[in-house]
Image (cartoon, helix red, strand yellow):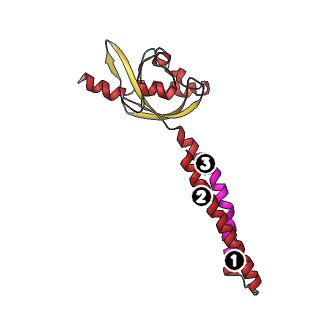
């Protein structure tokens, strides 16, 4: 049974940390934790759990650690971590139940890399502005065509030409959005 459990922990795709509740020091990390932080286990074991996070978030993460370690309820939060190279990543931290081993109390937590969520939000924001311009033009031209009494065929032809051009622009923007989304 122990081999089975070890296999599950070592093979997990999420980073798993175990910390001493009294000292806050990390006593165990799985291979996914090393991959997330781009370092070796020895670089993480012995560190205080707060050292995983940017200095500007220490007060908040220290409070969360206290909450995690003073209650048996399942909790999760988002926070940034700092990799060995100093890169900030957004993670979802899920706290597990505390446990006792050899007379000491420990807390375990699972870190899931969700930094791609920030990237997707930025892409969506940037791309939405590109989509809005031709769409607003199409809506404006359509309104003119349907609500005004345009008498001349030349005016209608010019507006329809503009409408076609804006539709092509929108199609081009949508293709760019799709390419950018596939690149993430």
Q: CA distance from mark 2 to mark 1?
A: 23 Å
From the top left corner, tell me how far across and down residue 61 is, in percent: 52, 27
Mark 2 vs mark 1: which is more N-terminal?
A: 1
Q: How many labels, in total?
A: 3
Q: Residue furthest top?
A: 102
From the top left corner, tell me how far across and down residue 102 is, in percent: 31, 12
Mark 1 vs mark 3: which is more N-terminal?
A: 3
Give the residue number, with chain letter if any, for mark 1. 160
From the top left corner, tell me how far across and down residue 138 is, in percent: 67, 69
Q: Is residue 24 visible?
A: no
Q: Is residue 129 left or right of residue 155?
A: left
Q: Is residue 149 left or right of residue 93?
A: right
Give the residue number, with chain letter if any, for mark 2. 175
The segment highlighted magenta reads 126-144
Q: Which residue appears at 39% of the width and 27% of the height?
A: 71
Magenta stretch secondary structure, dominant: helix
- Viewer-nearest residue: 157 or 110: 157
Q: Is residue 63 left or right of residue 151?
A: left
Q: Is residue 121 above or below residue 21?
A: below
From the top left corner, tell me how far across and down residue 144 is, in percent: 71, 77
- Crowding around mark 1 (Cα neighbors within 10 Å: few <14, some 14 to 19, many 20+) is some
């Amino acid at each position: 049974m122990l081999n089975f459990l070890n296999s599950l922990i070592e093979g997990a795709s999420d980073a798993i940390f175990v910390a001493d509740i009294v000292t806050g020091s990390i006593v165990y990390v799985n291979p996914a934790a090393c991959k997330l932080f781009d370092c070796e286990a020895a670089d993480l074991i012995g560190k205080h759990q707060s050292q995983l996070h940017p200095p500007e978030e220490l007060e908040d993460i220290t409070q969360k650690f206290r909450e995690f370690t003073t209650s048996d309820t399942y909790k999760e939060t988002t926070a940034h971590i700092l990799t060995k190279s100093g890169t900030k990543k957004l993670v979802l931290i899920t706290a597990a139940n505390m446990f006792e081993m050899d007379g000491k109390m420990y807390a375990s937590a699972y870190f899931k890399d969700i930094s791609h969520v920030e990237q997707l939000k930025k892409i969506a924001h940037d791309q939405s502005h590109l989509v809005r311009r031709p769409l607003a033009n199409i809506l404006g031209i359509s309104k003119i065509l349907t609500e005004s009494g345009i008498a001349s065929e030349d005016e209608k032809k010019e507006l329809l030409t503009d409408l076609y051009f804006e539709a092509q622009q929108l199609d081009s923007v949508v293709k760019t959005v799709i390419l950018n989304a596939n690149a993430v």
